[in-house]
Image (cartoon, rainbow, N blue to C red):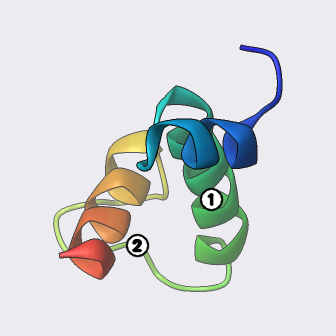
Amino acid sequence: MPGGAYEELARDGHLGVCGLELLRRLGRQVARTFPPPQGHSRWDDDAVDELLHRMIT
């Protein structure tokens, strides 16, 4: 998708595919310095998604 996360958000008014991917990449970078959430032995995509879901809700 041309334009990226900012343009997607400005155009649609909510996170789309690019915004979600950016959020996941940032989450993975930050999460490395903390232990994974309960029920996860490492920071995989599911663990990052769980963390982001908890933060947003």
Q: Position of residue 50 (x, y in %)?
A: 26, 60
Determine the image quadrant of residue 19: top right
Give the residue furthest to the right. 3
What residue do we see at 47% from left, 37% from top? 12
Which residue bears the numbered disc 1? 28
**Residue 43, horizontal then vertical, whole percent:** 49, 57
Q: Quadrant of residue 53?
A: bottom left
What amino acid type should be assigned to the residue bearing mark 2? Pro
Q: Provide the residue designation for mark 2.
A: 36
Q: Please give the name of the residue rendered at 33% of the width and 45% of the height, measured from the top-left corner.
A: 46
Above or below: residue 24 compared with residue 31: above
Using the image, determine if residue 12 lies above or below residue 9: above
* Residue drawn at the location 37% of the way across and 66% of the way down: 52
Secondary structure of the residue carrying numbered label 2:
loop
Q: What residue do we see at 71% from left, 14% from top?
A: 1
Which element is circle 1 on?
helix
